[in-house]
Image: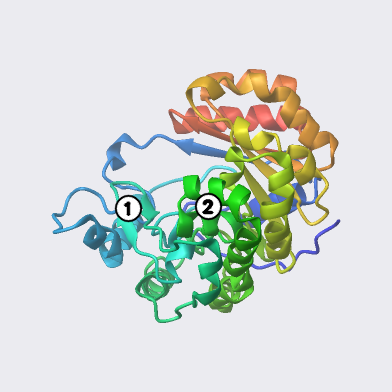
């Protein structure tokens, strides 16, 4: 499927090649290349060691609780703005801020509490039985939803001409149901109460369009492209469908409890990149490759046993052969091996570099690789 572009222009400090970078990304979504494959190069910034990622306040200020620290969005965004000063954004390394309260915030919109750690949060389960999900109500005045709105509004003003503003990490469907129940309990209920689980998963999906549109419409009205935690902006309606819970279940259960909700999510969005997290989730790859509305897959091999990236080259080639694009992350020392092993068409490279000079050299190598 060829996605039509609705072009927009942004003047971002440190990224004079914004328009061309967006064209390369749009071509990648279409499994095409306009001049070279896209590459995101994250350069280490030792002088910015206190500038943490979006949603995480640097440890320079004392708080009574970790929750207070996460919700101090003005301080977080001001610090993020400072971290952008004087930076070059090389190739497709877009500066992106997205409001962030952790991966379970979608489940918290329905009344679940979040518990915060240093760099993530998790949801306190609220259901005893899966069918109890039928009584849950989306709270538009929920403290976490209103906090995300406030973060977005402040970022749109504070980061003007400095960064693209995105929407928060949304995990509806089976992942949301797992947050409401607890993942281990959900595994048991798949066997003991499959009808109840279908009620819970359906409930966790029914409001996705309204929630997504709430953030999309706000950002689009400010002329923002569509982007979230993956830092890949699109001219259309970009979404990152996923099911991290799927690493615990069979292909049969994936098709029954996870896939229908994911398909429902993608009906309302035009640019979809599946977050495929590790070997346990890779068993579902064949089902994902059959989804017509899915343009790309982000492969996450994980650290330790998941490394090195070269052991996953056959899997990456399977994705490309099916006509899907792929986002692949790896270490700087693996760069040459990766581009020698893969064709450039459909590949988005994500790699860390020690210096700007290293990053520039890798971009030059990508240009030669593409030719």
Crowd around label 1: few <14 · some 14–19 · many ≥20 (10 Å):
many
- Asked whether, in this view, residue 76 is left or right of residue 103, the answer is left
Residue 159 percent across, percent down from the top left: 41, 65
**Residue drawn at the location 36% of the way across and 49% of the way down:** 120
Residue 360 visible from this viewpoint: yes
Q: Nearer the viewer, residue 43 or 110?
A: 110
Instruction: Tell me how many marks there are.
Output: 2
Q: Which mark is residue 15?
A: 2
Q: Is residue 202 above or below residue 292?
A: below
Side of 150 where 248 appears, left or right: right
Mark 1 near mark 2, Cβ–Cβ under 8 Å?
no
Which mark identifies residue 56?
A: 1
Mark 1–mark 2 distance (CA, rounded to whole Å): 24 Å
Describe residue 55's horizontal placement relative to residue 58 as left or right.
Answer: right
Q: Residue furthest front?
A: 192
| Screen quadrant of the N terminus | bottom right
Q: Is residue 328 visible?
A: no
Q: Nearer the viewer, residue 43 or 216?
A: 216
Q: Nearer the viewer, residue 347 or 12?
A: 347
- Residue 163: image location, x then y, percent: 47, 60
The answer to whether 371 is drawn above or below residue 51 in the figure is above
Q: Looking at the rendering, in which quadrant would you find the C terminus?
A: top right
**Residue 305 in the image: above or below residue 174:** above
């Amino acid at each position: 499927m060829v996605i039509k572009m609705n072009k927009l222009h942004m003047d971002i400090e440190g990224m004079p090649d914004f328009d061309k970078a967006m064209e390369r990304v749009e071509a990648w979504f279409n499994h095409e290349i306009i001049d070279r494959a896209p590459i995101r190069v994250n350069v280490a910034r030792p002088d910015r060691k206190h500038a943490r990622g979006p949603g995480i306040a640097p440890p320079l200020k004392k708080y009574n609780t970790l929750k207070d620290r996460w919700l101090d969005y003005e301080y977080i965004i001001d610090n993020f703005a400072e971290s952008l000063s004087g930076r070059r954004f090389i190739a497709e390394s877009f500066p992106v801020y997205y409001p962030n309260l952790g991966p379970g915030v979608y489940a918290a919109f329905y009344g679940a509490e979040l518990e915060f750690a240093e760099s993530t949060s998790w949801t306190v389960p609220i259901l005893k039985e899966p069918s109890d999900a039928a009584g849950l109500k989306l709270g538009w005045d929920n403290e976490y939803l209103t906090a995300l709105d406030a973060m977005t509004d402040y970022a749109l003003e504070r980061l003007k001409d400095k960064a693209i503003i995105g929407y928060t990490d949304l995990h509806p469907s089976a992942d949301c149901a797992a947050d409401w129940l607890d993942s281990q309990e959900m595994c048991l209920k798949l066997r003991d109460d499959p009808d109840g689980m279908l009620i819970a998963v359906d409930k966790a999906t029914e409001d996705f369009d309204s929630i997504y549109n709430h953030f999309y419409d706000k950002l689009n009205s400010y002329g923002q492209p569509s982007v979230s935690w993956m830092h890949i902006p699109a001219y259309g309606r970009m979404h990152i469908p996923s099911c991290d819970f799927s690493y615990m279940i069979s292909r049969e259960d994936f098709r029954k409890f996870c896939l229908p909700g994911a398909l429902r999510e993608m009906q309302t969005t035009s640019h979809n990149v599946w977050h495929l997290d590790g070997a346990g989730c890779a068993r579902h790859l064949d089902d994902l490759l059959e989804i017509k509305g899915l343009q790309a897959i982000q492969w996450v091999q994980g650290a330790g046993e998941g490394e090195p990236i070269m052991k996953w080259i056959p899997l990456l080639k399977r994705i490309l052969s099916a006509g899907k694009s792929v986002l692949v992350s790896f270490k700087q020392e693996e760069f040459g091996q990766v581009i020698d092993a893969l064709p450039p068409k459909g590949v988005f490279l994500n790699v860390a570099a020690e210096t700007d000079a290293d990053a520039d050299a890798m971009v030059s190598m990508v240009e030669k690789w593409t030719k």
